[in-house]
Structures are given as structure tokens and as C-alpha cells.
């Protein structure tokens, strides 16, 4: 139910924003709007104001703005309020306004989200120095060692773990070239094929090298009058070791759980200095606890000002846009697998999961999808806004309008491309549902 409601909310808002762009531009230029609809098919809610019928239709997978005289096949009266009576520049403005509204909306939403502040994993902004190598992983098979820094993936330089993940995740089961550098500055070039890892939350197939940073648990809350509080542990302390042995987030809970009544020397990093604090776990139920909540990795607090948040939103949207174009390019060159694409079911799953976490995650997802819609709708594919703009541009360059028959063929080709894409993403969505995938014997892996 959360997935369905989250999907309806996200898609409904984004479709409304997109169609509102077309609607406002049309009205500003004097084009008569006949229908403004959220959804397709039979109308379940409707009312008329002025010359326009506003409605909600039963199939919530899009929407449309129907303008007077927008279809060349119609019998046009030549009235000034018809779409085809406007100049190419005016029609361009109407077509462009929908995707532009999605891009502007994404910028504004992320501005609001980032202004609220957030905690982010600190390691994502740190150099990709290997802190652990999983056994039998692709990295282990090619000899990547702890302490080496990954500086390039598939010919692209990477300076942080965040950039590394962006390069590796879409390249599952595809051989790529990686450059690693040791502490002495010597570099090695390695050919490695990332394994396919299925993300437990989204069920997406992602590329995985089997490497990661050193993850130190960070205390985010200390319960009053419990062992950690009595020992002087504070929120923000980063745990480095227990009894002199290095510890990670995975090790911390079992180590404390098995030490009820046994004093532990916990080494923490605070304000750039290490401190040794003695804590004795107490019994709670069947396990030992010290009375803290912690993050499995260090976090950095992001609390931008009003203007700084706007700049960060620009940067975030720029990064997403670049990733979209790279994904599209990767699909054309076969560097990126079509399995990475998601359709309505995939979006519904992500929306439901984001809604369960909180409104910040939901609006962040909405912003990401909005910038995707804005860019994809500007692609020069007939039936999309960008396709119509592309046809007008060709007509302008040729200084003549194409025949209705030629435009119909171009639109049909675009429709066929979109149907192929839709079949692909729906198939991907279905393979992410365990019981449905079980009915697909060709998906079995030995």
C-alpha cells in the first residue's frame, strides 16, 4: 500500500507540474486549452472553467493538455487561438515549457530538502583508498590490496568513493579497466569484471568490485545514566578500537553483546584526538548493551545556509543530469545494461521505501525523477516534446512544413521506440519480483 500511495503521489505531482508548464505557456501565448487531464482513459472527476475542462482520469500513468488545433489532421479553422496558427517559436515555447517545469521543480525541491540539513556518509567524499577486500570478489581475483587507492575506472578519473560507486554500479558483468595507486605512488592497470549484486532494498542489479572503505562506527545518541554515559562517551565520538583491536560497525554489536559485566577499553576519536574510555556493558534481556545508538560509518553534518542550499541544489541537479546522459550513452554503446532501467513498478517500489523512511527521502526521490522526466522528454524522439521540437527544427531548416503523412510515419517510429522501451522496463520490473522471476527458467543461474 505504501508503494502504491507513494507512486501515485510522486507521479501525480510530477505529471501535474509537467502539464502545468504546457498549460501556462499555452495560455500566455493565447492558445485555447480544451482539456487539462491528470491520467488517461475514462474521466472520474471533472469540472469546466472558462474554455477548459479540468479532469482526473482513471489510469494514473501520465496526463495531457489538449489544445485547440494542435493536430494537423484536424480540420483547422485558422483561428488565432489554435496551436498550429502560432509561429514555430511560439509553439517551441509551449512544447519546451513542460520539461522546463520539471527541471525547475527538481531544483526547487532539492533546494528545500538540502536547506533542512542532513547527515551524509563521510566516506563518500573521501579518496577511494581500499580499506577492505571481500574474499573471492572481483577485486581479490585481480589482486587489489588494502591501502591501494582506486584512481580511475573505465578511463574516467575518480577522486572519491562516491565517484567510484557511480562508475562501477552500472557496469555489472562488463569488463572494465581500473587504475590503482599504492602508497609509494606506483600505479597498476587492471582489467576487472564487476560482479552483479542485487540491492536488498530495491532489487536492482548493481556492479560490485568487492571493495570498500574502512568504516568506523559513530555514536549518534547516548542514553542518560547508562554505561556509555557514565564512561564519558559522547554523541559524535567515532569508535576506533575495543581493547586495542580495530573495530567496524559490523563488529561492534556482537563484541559488546558477548561482554556483559566485562570492562572494555573503547578507543574513540573526538575533536581530532583519540581517547581511551572504560565501559562495562550491562545486561538487557539476553544480551549486553552500553546504551548508545550508532551509525555503522562516520557521518558529516550538512547544514547549508539559504543561498548555499540553492548552489548545492544546482550542483546536485547538474550531477544527476550528467549521470542521465552518461547512462543514455552507455545504453547506446552497450556499456550500461538495460537491466538498470526501471518502470512503473520499480518507481512504485522506490517511492514506497522512500515514504517509509521519511518525507526528505521521498522528496529527494521526486526531485531525481523530475529531472529525469525533464531531460528524457527533451530527447529528439517523435511523440515526446523533444521529438516535436526536433521536427519543427528540421522544418525550419528546410524552410517548408512536412506533409501530414511524413509526420505520421515519424510519430509512429517514435511510438514504436517508446513501446520497446516500455516493454523493457516492465520486464525489468517483473524480474525484480521474486515469485514472478521463479516462473522465468531462462533467468536461473547455475
Image (spheres, rainbow, N blue to C red):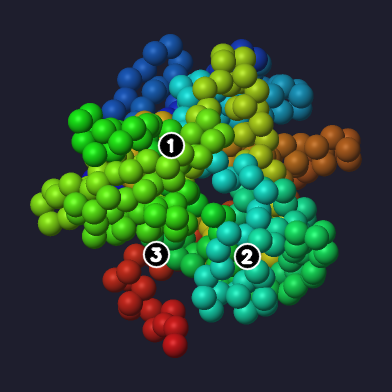
- Residue pointed to by mark 1: 237
Q: Nearer the viewer, mark 1 or mark 2?
A: 1
Distance in Å between CA atoms under marks 3 and 2: 34 Å
- Residue pointed to by mark 2: 146
Q: Position of residue 271 (x, y in %)?
A: 53, 30
Label 1 crowd bin: few (<14), some (14–19), many (20+), radius 10 Å = many
The relative height of residue 268 versus residue 109 in the rendered view (above or below) is: below
Asked if disc 1 and disc 2 are in contact, CB closer than 8 Å, the reply is: no
Q: Position of residue 257 (x, y in %)?
A: 24, 56
Is 169 in front, or is 282? 282
Is 380 in front, or is 185? 185
Name the residue furthest bottom.
446
Answer with mark 1 or mark 2, whichever residue precedes in sequence.
2
Distance in Å between CA atoms under marks 3 and 1: 39 Å
Give residue 340's quadrant in the image. Answer: bottom right
Label 2 crowd bin: few (<14), some (14–19), many (20+), radius 10 Å = some
Q: Position of residue 180 (x, y in %)?
A: 74, 63
Q: Position of residue 198 (x, y in %)?
A: 45, 65
Q: Nearer the viewer, mark 3 or mark 2?
A: 2
Residue at image location 36% in from the left, 48% down from the top: 265
Is 71 in front, or is 9? 9
Q: Nearer the viewer, mark 3 or mark 1?
A: 1
Assign the C terminus to one quadrant of the image. bottom left
In the picture, measured across the screen, residue 78 lies left or right of residue 430, that is: right
- Residue pointed to by mark 3: 432
The relative height of residue 245 versus residue 347 in the rendered view (above or below) is: below
Residue at image location 43% in from the left, 11% down from the top: 50
Quick one: SS at disc 1?
loop
Answer with mark 3 or mark 2, whichever residue precedes in sequence.
2
Amino acid at each position: 500500500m505504501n508503494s502504491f500511495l507513494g507512486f501515485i503521489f510522486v507521479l501525480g505531482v510530477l505529471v501535474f507540474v509537467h502539464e502545468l508548464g504546457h498549460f501556462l505557456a499555452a495560455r500566455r501565448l493565447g492558445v485555447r486549452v480544451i482539456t487539462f487531464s491528470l491520467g488517461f482513459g475514462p474521466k472520474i472527476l471533472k469540472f469546466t472553467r472558462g474554455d477548459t475542462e479540468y479532469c482526473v482520469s482513471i489510469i494514473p500513468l501520465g496526463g495531457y493538455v489538449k489544445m485547440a488545433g494542435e493536430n494537423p489532421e484536424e480540420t483547422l479553422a485558422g483561428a488565432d487561438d489554435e496551436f498550429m496558427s502560432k509561429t514555430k517559436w511560439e509553439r517551441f515555447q509551449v512544447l519546451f515549457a513542460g520539461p522546463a517545469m520539471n527541471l525547475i521543480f527538481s531544483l526547487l525541491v532539492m533546494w528545500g530538502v538540502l536547506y533542512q540539513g542532513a547527515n551524509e556518509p563521510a566516506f563518500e567524499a573521501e579518496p577511494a583508498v581500499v580499506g577492505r577486500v571481500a574474499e573471492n570478489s572481483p577485486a581479490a581475483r585481480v589482486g587489489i590490496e588494502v591501502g591501494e587507492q582506486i584512481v580511475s575506472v573505465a578511463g574516467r578519473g575518480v577522486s572519491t568513493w562516491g565517484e567510484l560507486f557511480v562508475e562501477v554500479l552500472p557496469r555489472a558483468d562488463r569488463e572494465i579497466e581500473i587504475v590503482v595507486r599504492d602508497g609509494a605512488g606506483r600505479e597498476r592497470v587492471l582489467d576487472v569484471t564487476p560482479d552483479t549484486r542485487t540491492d536488498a532494498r530495491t532489487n536492482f542489479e548493481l556492479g560490485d568490485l568487492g571493495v570498500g572503505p574502512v568504516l568506523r562506527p559513530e555514536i549518534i545518541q547516548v542514553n542518560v545514566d547508562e554505561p556509555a554515559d557514565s564512561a564519558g562517551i559522547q554523541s559524535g565520538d567515532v569508535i576506533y578500537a575495543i581493547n586495542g583491536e580495530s573495530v567496524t560497525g559490523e563488529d561492534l554489536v556482537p563484541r559488546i553483546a558477548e561482554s556483559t559485566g566485562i570492562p572494555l577499553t573503547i578507543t574513540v576519536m573526538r575533536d581530532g584526538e583519540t581517547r581511551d574510555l572504560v565501559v562495562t556493558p550491562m545486561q538487557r534481556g539476553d544480551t549486553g548493551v552500553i546504551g548508545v545508538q550508532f551509525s555503522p560509518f562516520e557521518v558529516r553534518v550538512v547544514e547549508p545556509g539559504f543561498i548555499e542550499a540553492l548552489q548545492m541544489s544546482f550542483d546536485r541537479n547538474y550531477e544527476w543530469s550528467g549521470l542521465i546522459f552518461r547512462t543514455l550513452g552507455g545504453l547506446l554503446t552497450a556499456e550500461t545494461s538495460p537491466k538498470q532501467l526501471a518502470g512503473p513498478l520499480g518507481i512504485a517500489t522506490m517511492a514506497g521505501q522512500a515514504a517509509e523512511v521519511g518525507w526528505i527521502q521521498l522528496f529527494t526521490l521526486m526531485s531525481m525523477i523530475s529531472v529525469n522526466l525533464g531531460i528524457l522528454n527533451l530527447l529528439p524522439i517523435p511523440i515526446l516534446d523533444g521529438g516535436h521540437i526536433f521536427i519543427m527544427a528540421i522544418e525550419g531548416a528546410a524552410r517548408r512544413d512536412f506533409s501530414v503523412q511524413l509526420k505520421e510515419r515519424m510519430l509512429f517510429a517514435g511510438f514504436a521506440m517508446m513501446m520497446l522501451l516500455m516493454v523493457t522496463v516492465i520486464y525489468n520490473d517483473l524480474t525484480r519480483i521474486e515469485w514472478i522471476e521463479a516462473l522465468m527458467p531462462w533467468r536461473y543461474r547455475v
